[in-house]
Structures are given as structure tokens and as C-alpha cells.
Amino acid sequence: MADHPKSLLFVCIGNTCRSPMAEALAKRRWPGLRIESVGTDASAYGPAEEAVIVMSSIGLDIQGHVARSLSDVDLNDYELIIALDKRLLRVLAERYGIERSKLIELHIDDPIYSGGVEAYRKCANRIAKRLGELPL
């Protein structure tokens, strides 16, 4: 990985909750970087309504986001790939052969299982906190 990566890819499962929120928060934090998100099992859906509400409440608009699959991107195009949980990190390393030096895990639980806007708000807050801890 370069000292200061110029491209980041956030990976979750459906690319409707965690990774779009992480993408939006990261773009605000690092406006000069190329930042995108995908899901391992994504279909072309829009973002979760709760994610839209939470991001809107902090001035970020993800309403136009359309979920993309991991298979839609060339993983070699990204200097840093950020898995939202341990299972995803393992999938990226083992199934896709991504070097561990290019991978980071954020340890973010999927709010879809908890449900409700408050679960998404807690998720977004955790993502923002973890982004502040990244070595960028």
C-alpha cells in the first residue's frame, strides 16, 4: 500500500447500508481521494431508507446510490480495500486473493439485523469513529 492511498474501496454484503454510508462519510473526510463502495452479494437496489435518513440528518445525500457488486470492479484499481467486518475480510483475502497489506477491517455490525433508524445512526457513528482511526 502507498503511504497515502489515493483510492479506497469499501466492501459490505448488499451495498445498501454500511458501505454506502462509509463511502459518503469518507468522501467528506478525504475529498481528494477516489472512494467507492461495493457489496459481495449486491443487486442494483437503492440504499436502505434508514441509511438515507441518517446520512441526510448529517448533511450527506446518498439517495441516488445504486448498489454495485464486487464483480463489477477490478480490485487491483484500489490501493486500500476496507472490509466492513471480519467475514468480509476473510472472503477478500481467501476467495479474491487480496494481499493483507491492502486490506483493513472496520468491525462494523450490519444494522439491517437490528433494524430501525437508531441502529443505522449507531452504525454511521461507529463508521465515522473507525474512519478517524484509519492510517491515512
Image (tube, helix red, strand yellow):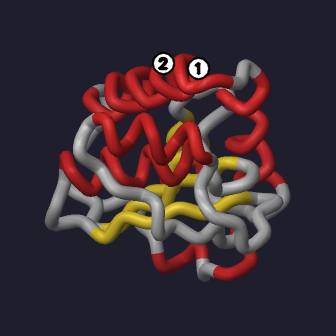
Q: Residue at x 19, y 53 (%)?
A: 30
Above/below status of 111 relative to 135: above
Q: Tell me if mark 2 has few (under 14), some (14-19) or many (20+) residues whose alpha carbon lies within 10 angstroms of its own.
A: some
Residue that label 2 marks? 122
Q: Quadrant of the C terminus?
A: top left
Q: Which residue is mark 1?
A: 119
The quarter of the displayed image where residue 39 is located: bottom right
- Horizontally, is 33 left or right of 55 in the view? left
Circles 2 and 1 in contact, beta carbons < 8 Å: yes
Relative to 40, residue 18 above or below: above
Query: Residue 99 sits in which quadrant?
Result: bottom right
Q: Residue at x 30, y 27 (%)?
A: 133
Seen at 21% across and 56% down, the residue is 4
Q: Amino acid at mark 1?
A: Ala
**Residue 50: percent from the left, percent from the top?**
56, 38
Mark 1 residue element: helix
Q: Is residue 101 visible?
A: no
- Which residue is rendered at x = 43% and y = 45% of the image? 22
Residue farthest along the left direction in this orientation: 32
**Horizontal and vertical percent position of residue 19:** 54, 49
Amino acid type shown at disc 2: Lys
Q: Say above or below: 2 vs 13.
A: below
Residue 24 spot, x, y in % from top left: 36, 53
Q: CA distance from mark 2 to mark 1?
A: 5 Å
Split into 4 quadrants, where in the image is the N terminus?
Answer: bottom left
| 96 left or right, relative to 51 | right
Picture coordinates of residue 52, whole percent (x, y): 48, 47
Front residue of 7/48: it is 48
Element under label 2?
helix
